[in-house]
Amino acid sequence: MLKSKRLKLMTVLIIAFGLLLTGCGEKALVHETLEEVPTEVKTEEETTTEEAKIEEATPEATATDVASSDDAEVAEDEGSEDEDDNVQQSANGKIVVLDPGHSSVVSGNTEPIGPGSGEYKAADSSGTSGSTSGLTEYQLNLQIAQKLRTELQNRGYTVYLTREDNSTGISCAERAQMANNLNADAFIRIHADGSDSSSASGAMGICITPSNPYISSMYSESRRLSDAVLNAYVAETGFSSRGVWETDTMTGNNWSQVPCTLLEMGFMTNPNEDSLMADEAFQSKMVTGIANGVDTYFFTD
């Protein structure tokens, strides 16, 4: 009987001890699981509350952002319109071909004075020279043309030169044909004058006549270009104006199928004008004057 009670007691103790061990195992398992969960896990209620706050704040914030964005876009559009206006005034797509007259290479050849003409003239020449500066005309012409190209490019024009150095031989007709091939909006021939008289002075423009036998259709625009360039040039430099000479004796003008003028900038045989035209500061005035004339031609009715 005593043994039976002891056996029952032992059985109860064993079962109880087993249950105790099982409970510890579950707690350890739960503890390990909790360590793997982030410590800042939010409850469903907390999450719902924050989402509600975000939804309440988002419409107002979005409206502000959109307003700021719209204002920025409007400002950008206004700025673009201003820039477009400047672009229309300066980067205008106009093509100007500058022809620095003469070069050091003279072929000695002749060419027709105009398309289909039976009259021939010298294809090229070296030009005149400075009585005090020591510059040749072809050197001065290139100096002015290169500076004028920069000035016109700064004003938005597309500019080409018929020659880039003083050792390139090119005829008068070939110079004009370059302007034709480029479909130039203006062809400006840069020259300086010479005379047996050292007192001869002033600037002059040269264009074709209304009855030009080769390209009379260009007369009106060529005359308008000549007036614009000459008038602006003498206004800026202070040189006297000898006016625009209409003649059909200039090969380069006769071959030009685009508006064309030849500018005689001044007399290199005149000591005063020669010294001025060779001066860097005065050359800036010369360039500004011609560029102003180009602007006048294109943008003044």
Image (tube, rainbow, N blue to C red):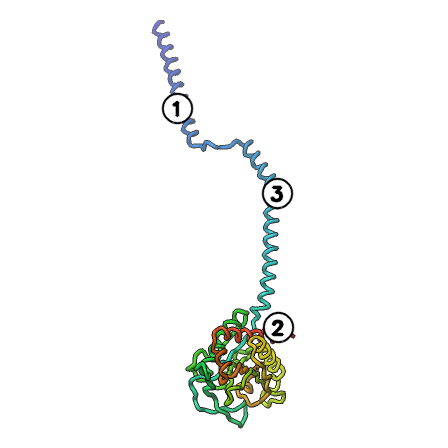
Q: Which mark is residue 60?
A: 3
Quadrant assignment for the N terminus: top left
> Of helix, strand and loop, which one carries label 2?
helix
Q: Nearer the viewer, mark 1 or mark 2?
A: 2
Foreground residue, 14 or 254? 254
Q: Report which quarter residue 290 is drawn in.
A: bottom right
Q: Report which quarter residue 213 is drawn in.
A: bottom right
Q: Residue furthest right?
A: 301
Q: Which mark is residue 299?
A: 2
Foreground residue, 61 or 273? 273
Foreground residue, 5 or 256? 256
Residue 286: horizontal and vertical position, in percent? 53, 76
Q: Residue furthest top?
A: 1
Rounded to the nearest whole Å, what is the CA distance between mark 1 and mark 3?
Answer: 53 Å
Q: Amino acid at mark 1?
A: Gly
Q: Amino acid at mark 2?
A: Phe
Residue 30: horizontal and vertical position, in percent? 43, 27
> Of helix, strand and loop, which one carries label 1?
helix
Identify which residue is drawn at 62% across, 73% down: 299
